[in-house]
Each structure stands twice: as C-alpha cells, then as structure tokens.
Amino acid sequence: MRILVAEDDAILADGVIRALRQSGFAVDWVHNGPEADTALEANQFDLLILDIGLPRKSGLEVLKRLRGRDSHLPVLILTALDGVNDRVRGLDAGADDYLAKPFELAELEARVRALTRRGMAGSPTLLKHGALSYDQVGRVARLNGEALELSAREVSLLEVFLARAGRLVSKDQLVSHLCEWGEEVSANAIEVYVHRLRKKLEPGGVRIVTVRGLGYSLEKHDPR
Ligand code: CA
C-alpha cells in the first residue's frame, strides 16, 4: 500500500510519515501543490493525505484537479482547527474524510485504515496461492491457516509477489515497491528480504524461485 503525503510542515509530515511507515505503508512526501500534481499523475497511490494549506497551489486545487481526472483515489484532507470552510469545501470537492490540526497520530492511523479498506471494496480482500492466504485488509498472511510472522518489508514484498503470482517479478520492481523516494534499498538488501521470506513460505510448499539474472517468481508445489 502506497500513500502520498502532501504537507509543507516538515515536523508534522515527519511524524505522520514515521507512523505510517511503522504500520507498513510505503510513503512518499511532497511539499507543495505542483509537486503533488506531478506525483499524482506519475504514480499509483492507494491514499492521498492532503494538507489544504499548501504553498504555491492549495490542496483544494490539487483535489479538484485529481477528481477532474476521474480519479477515485481516497483522499484525507488536513485542515486548520478553525478551518470550517476549508473542511466543507474540501468535502464538496471530493475529499473522503478530514482531520483538523493538531490531531493524534492514532486517530490519523485509524482513519487511514478505514479509507484504505474502503478503497479496496471492489477488489477481493483474500488472496490465495496454494497453502498461502493473504488478507489484504488486515495485512495478515497465513500458511495452512497458521498466521505467519512477517516484518513490514516482508509483507510488502509478499504483496508484490502475490499480485504477480506465477509470473516473473524483477528485482527492480521489488526495489521500486519497497523504496520510498529518497531512501535507497539496494539489490543486495532485496536479496536478504527475499531469502527471509522464502524460508518462511517453504514449509507450506510455496516457493520463491530465483530466475537467474532476471528476478523471482512465486510458485506453488503441486502435490499431484
Ligand atoms: Ca500547510
């Protein structure tokens, strides 16, 4: 799950981003309206957290432009405490929810969970691959019904593999899924994460096969 945070207050953004990454989300950060436009046009996100008071172009304009492109991306707007008009205009312009500053991070996280759930309403929430099942809402993977203990990074990797089960996943795809802007995740690090994930999946006959020089493929052992 990838979230775009558009917020010019660095201290606030830092706290929000830390909390979201802790919860296993991949987070990108932009600081002004035009950067938000560019990021939204160039990338696929699962949620936008949008400050209404953005420099150079307001969050409201960013939101109108987004909805003008027929995007159904869930949007949570951040407004000033006394910004009743901002809230009303934001919701009218197609925001899904709002939070008034200052807010508790726990509340932000609860709303993010609710919005990302809603965003997935049209897609199946339980993915299956052999003995492996993955609950996209709770982000819980099970092997033969037993919950697997996975790190946030391993969960992110598993999401990529399941989305392309049985097909080739290049190392570049894994790197770009895992690394947020400005944060380097090396190909070597990917190998370590894949190795760990592979060991956890193997007992259930689910294999991550290395395709030499190209990447990996998620396969399942066929018992026949
Ligand atoms: Ca602001």
Image: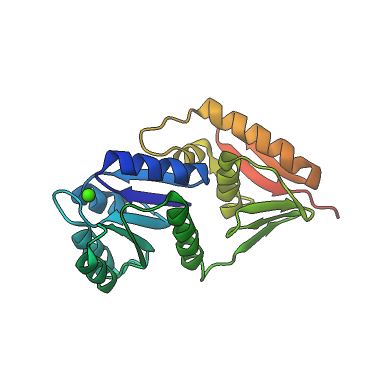
Q: Identify the image quadrant of the C terminus.
A: bottom right
* Direction bottom: furthest residue: 92
Residue 126: where, in percent of width, then height? 64, 62
| Residue plotted at (57% across, 52% down) | 164
**Residue in the foreground of this view, choosing between 201 and 221:** 201
| Residue plotted at (68% across, 59% down) | 128
Residue 41: where, in percent of width, then height? 28, 54
| Residue plotted at (71% across, 46% down) | 148
Colouring used for the render? rainbow
Is residue 212 visible to the viewer in this orientation of the structure?
no
Side (left or right) of 129 relative to 75 = right
Residue 117: where, in percent of width, then height? 51, 64
**Residue in the foreground of this view, choosing between 26 and 185:** 26
Side (left or right) of 189 relative to 12 = right
Residue 98: where, in percent of width, then height? 34, 63
* Direction top: furthest residue: 188
Side (left or right) of 55 relative to 74 = left
Asked if 62 appears above or below 207 in the picture, the reply is below
Q: How many marks?
A: 0
* Direction right: furthest residue: 224
Is residue 166 visible to the viewer in this orientation of the structure?
yes
**Residue in the foreground of this view, choosing between 172 and 19:** 19
Task: Please tell me in which quadrant of the rendered image residue 90 appears.
Answer: bottom left
| Residue plotted at (78% across, 56% down) | 145
